Amino acid sequence: MNTDILEREVQYLKGVGPKRADAWAEAHGVRTVHDMLHFYPRRYLDRSTTTGVRDLREGDAATVMGTVQSGNVVPGKSNKRFELILEDAEGQRMKGVWFQGLWWIRNTFEVGERVALHGTVQKYGRWFSMTHPDFDRLSDEAAALDTGRIVGLYPGGQAMEAVGLTSRSIRRIIYRFFKEHGLKLGEPLPDWMTEQYGLMEGRVALRAIHFPKSQEERAQAVQRLKFEELFYIQLLLAITRHERQEIAGPTFDPPGSLTTQFATDVLPFELTEAQKRAVREIVADTQTGIQMNRLVQGDVGSGKTVVAVLAILQAYDSGYQSAFMAPTEILAEQHANSLAEYLAPLDLQPTLLTGSQSKTEREAALASVAEGATPVAVGTHALIQDNVAFDRLGLAVVDEQHRFGVMQRAEMFEKGDRPHMLLMTATPIPRSLAMTLYGDLDVSKIDEMPAGRKPVTTVMRREKQRDDVYAFIRERLQAGEQAYVVYPLVEESEKLDLKDAESGYATLQAQFPDFNVGLVHGRMASDEKDRTMRAFKAGELDILVSTTVIEVGVDVPGATIMLIEHAERFGLSQLHQLRGRVGRSDQQSYCILMAGYKQSAEAKQRLAAMTRTTDGFEISEEDLRIRGAGDFFGTRQSGMPELKLADITEDTDALETARNAATALITRDPELSDEAHAALRTYFDRYYADQSMGFLRVG
Ligand SMILES: Nc1ncnc2c1ncn2[C@@H]1O[C@H](COP(=O)(O)OP(=O)(O)OP(=O)(O)O)[C@@H](O)[C@H]1O
C-alpha cells in the first residue's frame, strides 16, 4: 500500500499553511494526512440529536440549537456570572450560564448568531439553563443543518480558534482533501477479512466518519475504524506470540526429589485443584525446550507463592537457578522472607539482592549467585537488567506483573539465557484488559481459594465509633488473634505520614497497654523492619502498626483484623490488597475501614465496593469502571495504547473479534508475505510495528 499520501504534511494542504499546521500539531498532534484523517469529530449535530427548549427535561444531557438573543454579565457578590440567552426555532428561550472566564466568554458570542449548547439541563424558576455548557458557534453549519445534513464538530480550543481552525474550516480542509485525493487512499485490510467480519471499506469509512450521510453510515464507519484500532494491537501481540513459539528455552526434568519432598514433607496442606492445574501447566511448558511465557493470575491469598516455589524447586532439581523479581525493594525483601521460610526445611536459602545492601553484603550475595550456590536470587527487576551473573539461570519469576508493561516484559524476556518466564499477579484483570495487557502470554488462573477460607467481614466506621472499634479489637486480641493497623502513605509527604503512623502507634500503645504493639514503616532500616515483621509473625506482637509497606506479600495467617485508617485515601485495588493480608486461615477475619466525613464521590464508590464484595474480580471491574482504563494501573504504568474510538472496558466483543482476526491472519500467513497481505504489511510496519512498541512502552 502506498503510504506516501498519508505521510504528506498537512501544512501543504490547501487551507492549512504553517501557522495552522503548528497549532494543529501542538493542540492535537495532527501533523500528517494520516493524523488528520484520524482526527475525528468529537460530536455530530443533526436535527435528530438536538432538542427544542420545550422538550427539555431537568437532569438530561442535551444539545440545544438557537440564536443568541443577548449576553450579559449579571452582577452578584458570590455569583457574578455571564448569562447567554438563546432562542430556538420555535421561539422558546433558555440560558447558558458561566461563572468563570466571564470576560473571555463575553467576547465570544455575537447577538444574532447561531449557537449550539451541550450540557446538563437545569431548571431555575421558569428558565431552563446549562452551567458552563460545551458550545459550538454554528456560523454556517446552520444552513447545512437546515437542509437535514449531519455535521461533524471537531475538538477545538483557544489555540486552534486563534488561527481560524474552527470546525468549519477543518471540515473544509478535509472535504477538499477527499475530493482531490480520496481515491488514492488504499485499503490495508485484505478482502477476506473485510468480508468475514462485515467491515466497511477503509476509505469509505474514513470519509463517512467525517461526513456521514446518515447515522447508520456513521455507525458502520465507527465499527470499521474501531476494529482497525484494536486489530493492529492484537496483530502486534499475535506476532509476538508467534515469534516466541520459536524461541528455545531450557529443558527442565520432570518434577524430582526436591519438589516431592516439598509437597509431602513441607507443605502442611494439600494444593487446591487450581494450584495443581497451574503447576501441571508450568511443568508441561518447561519440558518442551521452548521458552515459557506464563502468567499466573489469582486473587490475594489464593496461593500463588506456593506455585512459584514449586517451579523454583523443579528448576533447581534440573540444575537451574531462578530469579524472583518484585516491583519494589520492600516487596523483594518480603518475598525473600517468605521464600526463606518455605525453603528452610529443605536446607535451601534464597539470596536477597537490593540496592540498599552494603557493599560487602552485596558482594557476598553476588558470589553465591554466580557460584550457583543459591537456588533463587530475589530482588527488583534490576536483577535481570543489571546483568547479575547467574551460574545457570533457568527461571525468572516476576511478581505483580501488571506493574510492568508489555515492552518492559519483552526486554526481560530477551535477556541472557532466555530463562522460562513465570509472571504472577494478584490483580484480577477484567477479561477485556487481559486480552490486551497479557495478549502475548499463556495464562493460568488460580480461581479457587484454599478450603475453609471465610470471606473477610468488611465494615466502614467513623471517628465517633472509634471506642467501639477498639473494644472489638481488644476482644479479638484476647482470643489470641492479631491485628494490623495501616496508615496511608502519601509519597510527597513521607514525613507527615510517618507522623500519622507514629502518633497512631503511640495512641495504640496507650489504648492497649496489656498488649504488644509494633511499628514498621518504609524509612526504617531493613533489619529493624525484618525484626518487627518476624516478631509479629511469631506472635510476639499483637498489633502491627504500619504504613502501606505491608500491602503485598505479607503472610501472617494468625492475623484476623485489618484496621485501615483514612481509608478514603486509598485506591480500590490497594484496599483489596490490604484486606487480603487477613482471611488467610480458616478463622473469621475482619476489615475495618475508618473513613473521614469528607469523601469525594469516587472515594464513596470505592468504600461502598469494599463493603459490598470480597471478590477480587468484582473489585477490579469496579475499579476499572470508577477510574477508566487509562488510569486503571496508573497511566504511566498501564502500557495501554491510546484509543480514539474503542473503549477497552466496553468493547469486549470488538476486541475479541479483532483478536480472532489477528490470530487467523498469523496462522494463515505468519510472515505476512502473501501478496494479499502486502498492503497490510506496509501499513502495519509504517504505523504500528515501531510506534505501537512506543505506546506499549512503559515508564
Ligand atoms: N492449598 C492451600 N491450602 C491451604 N492453605 C494454603 C494453600 N495454598 C496456600 N496456602 C496458604 O495461604 C496463604 C496464602 O498463600 P500465598 O502466600 O501463596 O498466596 P498468594 O496468592 O501469593 O498471596 P498474596 O498475593 O496475597 O501475597 C499462605 O499462608 C499459604 O501458606
Image (cartoon, rainbow, N blue to C red):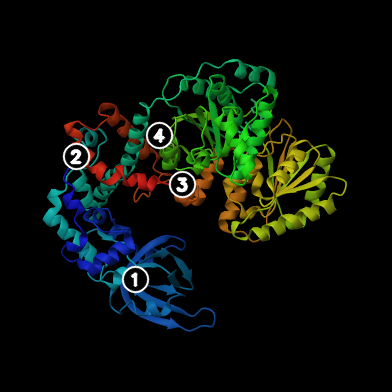
Q: State the residue position of label 2.
A: 679
| Disc 3 crowd, CA 10 A, few/some/many (<14, 14-19, 20+) | many
Q: CA distance from mark 3 to mark 2?
A: 31 Å
- Mark seen at residue 440: 4
In the rendered image of this protein, does residue 489 appear above or below residue 393? below
Q: Amino acid at mark 4?
A: Asp
Q: Position of residue 32 (x, y in %)?
A: 23, 56
| Disc 4 crowd, CA 10 A, few/some/many (<14, 14-19, 20+) | many
Point 30% across, 68% down: residue: 160
Q: State the residue position of label 1.
A: 158
Point 16% across, 48% down: residue: 185
| In this rendering, position of residue 311 left or right of residue 506 | left
| In this rendering, position of residue 290 left or right of residue 546 | left
Contact between marks 1 and 2 (CB within 8 A): the answer is no
Q: Amino acid at mark 3?
A: Ser
Q: Is residue 274 visible?
A: no
Quarter of the image containing the N terminus?
A: top left
- In this view, the mark in front (3 or 1): 3
Q: CA distance from mark 4 to mark 3?
A: 15 Å
Q: CA distance from mark 2 to mark 4?
A: 24 Å
Contact between marks 3 and 2 (CB within 8 A): the answer is no
- Sequence-first tag of 1 and 4: 1
Q: CA distance from mark 1 to mark 4?
A: 42 Å
Q: State the residue position of label 3.
A: 638
Contact between marks 1 and 4 (CB within 8 A): the answer is no
Mark 2 lies on a secondary structure that is helix
| In this rendering, position of residue 371 left or right of residue 209 | right
- In this view, the mark in front (1 or 4): 4
Mark 3 lies on a secondary structure that is helix
Q: Amino acid at mark 2?
A: Ala
- Sequence-first tag of 3 and 2: 3
